[in-house]
């Protein structure tokens, strides 16, 4: 039997994030985004060396900080993150409320956007940025360009 180059249940691209407290992060992602924990591999000193969660149909790998192993540092240690994880959900407003109740902070309130999504941004308690969106309107590239121009003034 041949081994599949991409394991069942994975997409071609899977985010792998580093957090300052992986156990707490897993609990937060469960509460905020309905994540399901698939696996957890303990590491030295009670840290989590590797964990896998699933949010909707997508998997996210995560682990605690291990500066001694390849400089694995979290946004908390780095002073922020330049990466945004985009999460499409059926009801952005409900997900926003749920995530805020779980401890996320609003970076950009959810609002209808010119590209056809209701979209907002949150920062999780571990410093990761999350764009949460619900697609509300199908638009052509030309319509999006016209709306972008009007938005920009």
Image (tube, rainbow, N blue to C red):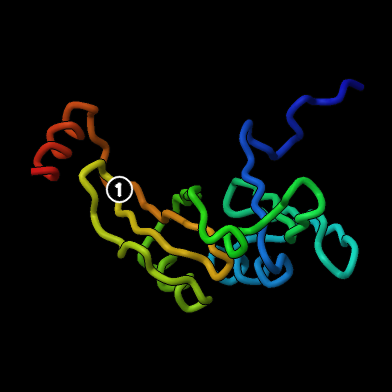
Q: Quadrant of the C terminus?
A: top left
Name the outermost residue toward the bottom.
Answer: 101
Side of 117 relative to 59 (left or right): left
Above/below status of 21 relative to 36: below
Residue 16: x %, y % from top left: 66, 47
Q: Residue at x 44, y 65 (%)?
A: 95
Q: Quadrant of residue 65?
A: bottom right
Q: Residue at x 34, y 58 (%)?
A: 120
Report the side of 19 relative to 68 (left or right): left
Residue 77 location (% of width, % of height): 62, 62
Residue 82's place in the image compared with 35, above or below, is above
Element assignment for label 1: strand
- Describe residue 6's horizontal placement relative to residue 54 as left or right: right
x and y, in percent, of residue 79 in the image? 53, 61
Q: Position of residue 46 (x, y in %)?
A: 86, 70
Q: Quadrant of residue 148?
A: top left
Question: Is 74 or 57 nearer to us in this picture?
Answer: 74
**Which of the 4 quarters of the picture holds residue 97?**
bottom left
Q: Residue at x 64, y 40 (%)?
A: 14
Q: Identify the residue under disc 1.
A: 117
Residue in view at x 62 percent, y 44 percent = 15
Query: Callout 1: 10 Å neighbours few (<14), some, many (20+)?
Result: some
Q: Is residue 124 above or below residue 9?
A: below
Tally of numbered tags: 1
* Quarter containing the N terminus: top right
């Amino acid at each position: 039997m041949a081994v599949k180059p991409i394991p069942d249940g994975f997409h071609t691209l899977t985010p792998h994030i580093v957090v300052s407290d992986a156990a707490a992060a897993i609990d937060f992602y469960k509460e905020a985004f309905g994540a399901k924990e698939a696996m957890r591999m303990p590491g030295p000193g009670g840290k989590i060396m590797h964990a896998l969660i699933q949010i909707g149909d997508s998997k996210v790998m995560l682990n605690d900080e291990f500066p001694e192993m390849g400089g694995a540092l979290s946004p908390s240690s780095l002073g922020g993150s330049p990466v945004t994880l985009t999460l499409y959900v059926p009801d952005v407003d409900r997900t926003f409320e749920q995530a805020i109740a779980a401890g996320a902070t609003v970076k950009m309130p959810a609002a209808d956007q010119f590209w056809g999504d209701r979209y907002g941004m949150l920062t999780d308690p571990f410093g990761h940025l999350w764009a949460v969106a619900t697609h509300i309107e199908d638009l052509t590239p030309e319509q999006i360009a016209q709306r972008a121009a009007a938005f920009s003034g």
